């Protein structure tokens, strides 16, 4: 999801390309121990991607992305990227649920510890890089 993750002009198969790009990014990551991403392709060029990744330190990332093809542009309407340590305690979560109108990036935001900060939707590659840094720091 290079560039703006909310609108991509990447051809007629934007939904399939999104799923392929996520699969390739995960497959090329050296920190992913296992991956279970389900793809539910719906009517009117929509896809719901849901699943989790387990990392080499037993931490995990839950992924939920709902996207649609609007005039040959990818539009991600809902997302949740929830990273937890091996005890299932949240380390961070990116999402666009509309429950934090106080952030300037509303509805997009990031949960870290006991606070919510401004954020935009990161690419899967950016999230994996962030997780990699956390894993390296904890060793």
Image: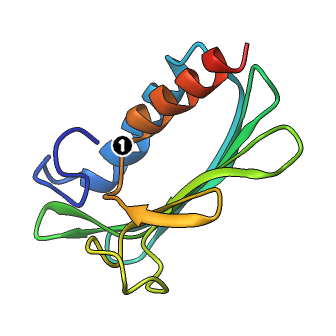
Q: Secondary structure at mark 1?
A: loop
61 to the left or right of 86: left
Residue furthest front in the image: 114
Q: Is residue 18 above or below residue 118?
A: above
Res 103 → quadrant: bottom left
Q: Is residue 34 visible?
A: yes
Percent coordinates x, y for residue 31 in the rendering:
63, 18
Percent coordinates x, y for residue 137 in the rendering:
62, 18
Q: Quadrant of the C terminus?
A: top right
Q: Is residue 98 above or below residue 6?
A: below
* Residue highlighted by disc 1: 123
| Label tally | 1
What residue is rendered at 64% in x and 64% in y? 114
| Front residue of this view, candidates 116 and 84 | 116
How busy is the neighbourhood of tag 1: few (under 14 within 10 Å), some, or many (20 plus)?
some
Q: Is residue 84 above or below residue 103?
A: above
What residue is rendered at 36% in x and 69% in y? 108
Percent coordinates x, y for residue 73 in the rendering:
15, 61
133 to the left or right of 68: right
| Front residue of this view, candidates 35 and 31 | 31
Q: Is residue 43 above or below residue 126?
A: below
Percent coordinates x, y for residue 82 in the rendering:
62, 54
74 to the left or right of 30: left
Res 21 → quadrant: top left
Render colour scheme: rainbow
| Front residue of this view, candidates 17 and 122 | 122
What residue is rendered at 29% in x and 42% in y? 1
Q: Is residue 65 visible?
A: no
35 to the left or right of 12: right
């Amino acid at each position: 999801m290079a560039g703006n993750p909310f609108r991509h002009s990447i051809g007629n198969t934007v939904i399939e390309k999104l799923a392929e790009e996520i699969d390739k990014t995960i497959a090329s990551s050296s920190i992913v121990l296992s991956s279970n991403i389900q793809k539910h392709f719906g009517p009117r060029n929509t896809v719901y991607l849901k699943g989790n990744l387990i990392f080499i330190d037993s931490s995990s990332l839950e992924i939920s992305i709902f996207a649609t093809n609007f005039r040959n542009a990818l539009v991600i309407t809902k997302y949740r990227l929830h990273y937890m340590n091996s005890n299932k305690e949240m380390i961070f979560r990116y999402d666009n649920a509309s429950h934090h109108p106080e952030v300037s990036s509303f509805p997009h935001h990031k949960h870290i510890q006991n606070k919510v900060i401004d954020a935009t939707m990161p690419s899967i590659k950016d999230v994996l890089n962030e997780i990699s840094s956390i894993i390296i720091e904890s060793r």
